[in-house]
Image (cartoon, rainbow, N blue to C red):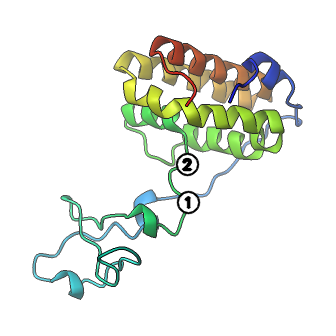
């Protein structure tokens, strides 16, 4: 899918008033899937009361556990939406040792979900990002992640100052730069 240049897409999005301090609910990814219980070597899987597989050849049985003792998540059984799609931001935040519910990720997810997703051009930009970002994230170097982190900081500032189109353009330019650098083309 061809997406028009980020400047024209971002500039076509309306400005929605000044940014206010936003509060985000805390979200623990592991707890949402019941993956916080550690393995008790004295109990069999059937005695743990853990999640039950709903589909496939092991339907009706307890899920297995990862090496760290947490319940294994099966994508087909997930009752919540799968990964949020912040591939590059998530990778940069993980590189910095930040949790999945950090201020930066929450701010950019909120921007995507409450601002960009309202407009057809914004939805096209999001779709384009989902096509190229996984491949970029897979090829990203430490230097790339440091660059992404710098861009995240700039975007957060622009969003907080109500410069939404600028934040969109800044992030889009970063994605385009990294896609070119790593020879990632539209899926």
Q: Is residue 86 above or below residue 37?
A: above
Number of dots carrying numbers: 2
Q: Which residue is under mark 1?
A: 81
Q: Which of the two residues, 149 or 136, is positioned nearer the viewer here?
A: 136
Left or right: 33, with 118 as reference point: left
Question: Going 56% across and 40% down the picture, which residue do you hit?
Answer: 105
Q: Secondary structure at mark 2?
A: loop
Can you give x and y, in whole percent of width and height, for residue 29 in the image? 45, 58
Can you give x and y, in whole percent of width and height, for residue 4 in the image? 76, 21
Q: Is residue 144 visible?
A: yes
Quarter holding residue 20: top right
Tag shown at residue 100: none
Question: Going 55% across and 43% down the picture, which residue do you hit?
Answer: 85
Q: Is residue 36 above or below residue 48?
A: above
Q: Secondary structure at mark 1?
A: loop
Q: Which residue is under mark 2?
A: 84
Can you give x and y, in whole percent of width and height, for residue 84 in the image? 55, 48
Kindly indicate whether the residue at mark 1 contacts the one at mark 2 (C-beta within 8 angstroms).
yes
Question: Going 47% across and 11% down the picture, which residue do you hit?
Answer: 181
């Amino acid at each position: 899918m061809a997406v028009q240049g980020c400047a024209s897409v971002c500039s076509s999005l309306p400005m929605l008033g000044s940014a206010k301090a936003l509060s985000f609910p805390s979200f623990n990814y592991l707890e949402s899937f019941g993956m916080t219980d550690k393995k008790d070597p004295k109990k069999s899987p059937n005695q743990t009361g853990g999640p039950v597989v709903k589909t496939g050849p092991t339907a009706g049985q307890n899920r297995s556990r990862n090496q760290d003792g947490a319940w294994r998540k099966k994508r087909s059984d997930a009752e919540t939406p799968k990964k949020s799609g912040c591939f590059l931001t998530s990778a940069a935040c993980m590189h910095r040792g930040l949790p999945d519910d950090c201020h930066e990720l929450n701010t950019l997810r909120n921007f995507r979900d409450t601002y960009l997703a309202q407009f057809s051009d914004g939805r096209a930009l999001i779709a384009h990002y989902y096509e190229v970002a996984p491949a970029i994230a897979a090829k990203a170097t430490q230097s790339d992640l440091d660059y992404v982190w710098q861009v995240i900081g700039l975007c957060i500032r622009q969003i907080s100052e109500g410069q939404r189109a600028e934040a969109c353009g800044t992030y889009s330019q970063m994605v385009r730069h990294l896609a070119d650098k790593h020879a990632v083309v539209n899926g």
